[in-house]
Amino acid sequence: MKLLKMKYLFFIIFMLGWVPFHYAGAAPSFVPARIIKKARIPYPKKAEMQGKQGVTWVKVKVGINGKPLKVLVVTSSGSKLLDKRAEEIAAKSLYKPEMKQGVPAASWLLYSIHSRLPKAVQQALNQIQTLKEKIAHSPDKWRLYNKLAMFYMAQSNWSKAEETYQIALKKWSNNPALAAGLARVDLDKGERIKAIPDLERAVKLNPTDPTFPPILADLLVSAHHFNQALPVLEKAHLLNPKNVYMLQDLGYVYYQKHEYLKSASAYRKALVLKPDDPSLEVNLGNALLSAGKFKECIPLFIQAIKLEPENPNLLYSLGVSYFYENKPQEARDSFRKAVLAMKVQHAPSGNLATVYLELGIIDFQLKDQKEGVHYLSRAYRLDPENPLYIKALAKGYYNTKQYKKAYSLFQKIVKIQPQNAKTYELMGSIDSVEHHWNQAEKNWKLALKFYRKEKNKVKIKKIQKTLNRLKRLLKEKQSQGD
């Protein structure tokens, strides 16, 4: 009996040990699909602001390669934003396909996605709720409103922040901090123009605070409200005289208002504070150039060109300075370098035409008339409808006695400017040279008519003399013919 029991026990132990040994290398007949790596998708900003969170159940069809083929929302979280995020997570996650007898198969996988607010957001929302409760019990404390609006701003909930500040400003209309806060909301929203009246209010309520005038001035300058910007900048400069950016803006506004010497003064002060800034040297040079201080601006442009030798604007400005300093050779060299730099940088044709015009005028000054006509014709070809270039080339042809070409361009000018007295005068001169006496008389009479409108006494006297000489000449020819 004992032997039988021992055999039975041995058989059980043998079977327990044998079964796993026998199946150790065999694959399970079925392994369901599973998620390997869940995609990380940012929490929707709007859901954060609304304090939304919840659970979305999704059903994903996983292909044999583990890629999601289809995503369905089975149970909503109660928020479309969170459901959309859950769908995106399911669609971008990595999966292991279902296995049947070791072979991958397409299948559906059902699982839940929990959308929980980030800890920092949850804390902020709790603080907002606490502040709301405090305001409800202490409605007269403006600092609580300010703090609440700032929490909304931290959540990028601009509409709530703006609403909070507006409610507070109805109660404390003379509070500069609240006015500034409302302006900050506008700025953070990117509504710079809208921020201007709020900042003006803040500056007016707290005129000694140096914080807001620079911001307000920057907005006004950006909006090209130069008349409004100027007193704000001057005040900001008095509050903080060592602020380089204020001086730079001040110089820019003075320049735009054509107060070039004041502009130069502001840029000089800025250069003292920031001597290694090449842009300030250039701006100072441009202010001096516009003020007619050509000798002073030349060294500034030369210094700037050392740092940027292929800057066409600097080369052009230097050329203009040399031109007005009666240094035509240096001006021509600078303009030619500007042309090369413009071609390399594919500058607009209008800018190039301007430099060609300057080169043409200088070449005529240097008695190089052929080269002068060459550059004037280049300017004209780039902008053939510009009266400035038509006149310049027409005069170039006139001075080089290419009368036929000159006359054709003069005719084009009077079509654009039918009361251009000088053009009629020159046309009359060409008619005279070509012995077209009647046409010469007609053009000179038109010139006299329009010079009288201009009240140009010198020209009136000159044309009258010319017409009198023509009358005498025509009489002599008539008498000789008789």
Image (tube, grey):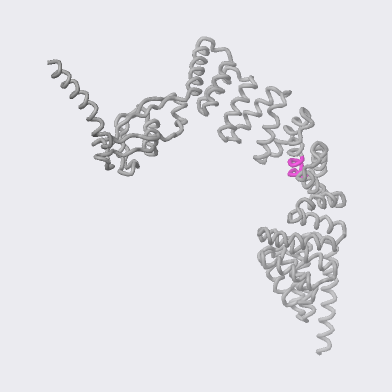
Residue 369: give x, y in percent of width and height: 81, 72
Of all residues, the one furthest to the left in this rendering is 1
Residue most toward the front?
3
Q: Can see residue 425? A: no
Residue 184 in percent (x, y) is at 60, 28
In the image, 20: left or right of 352?
A: left
Label tally = 0
Write the residue at 49% across / 24% down.
121
Name the residue rendered at 72%, 75% in the picture: 405
Residue 481 occupies quadrant: bottom right
Image quadrant in which you'd find residue 10: top left
Q: Is residue 171 left or right of residue 210?
A: left
348 in magenta: no
Q: Using the image, determine if residue 177 lies above or below residue 247.
A: above
Above or below: residue 466 compared with residue 339:
below
**In the displayed structure image, the side of residue 135 where residue 242 appears, left or right:** right
Quarter of the image for the C terminus: give it.
Answer: bottom right
Give x and y (percent) for residue 152: 52, 24
Give the main secondary structure, helix, strand or loop, of the magenta stretch. Answer: helix
374 left or right of 298 in image: left
Horizontal and vertical percent position of residue 143 = 59, 16
Residue 252 forms part of the magenta stretch: yes
Q: Which residues are magenta?
A: 251-258
Vertical order, 37 against 177 (above or below): below
Is the N terminus in the top left, top right, bottom left or bottom right quadrant? top left
Name the residue located 79 percent from the left edge and 31 percent from the top edge.
241
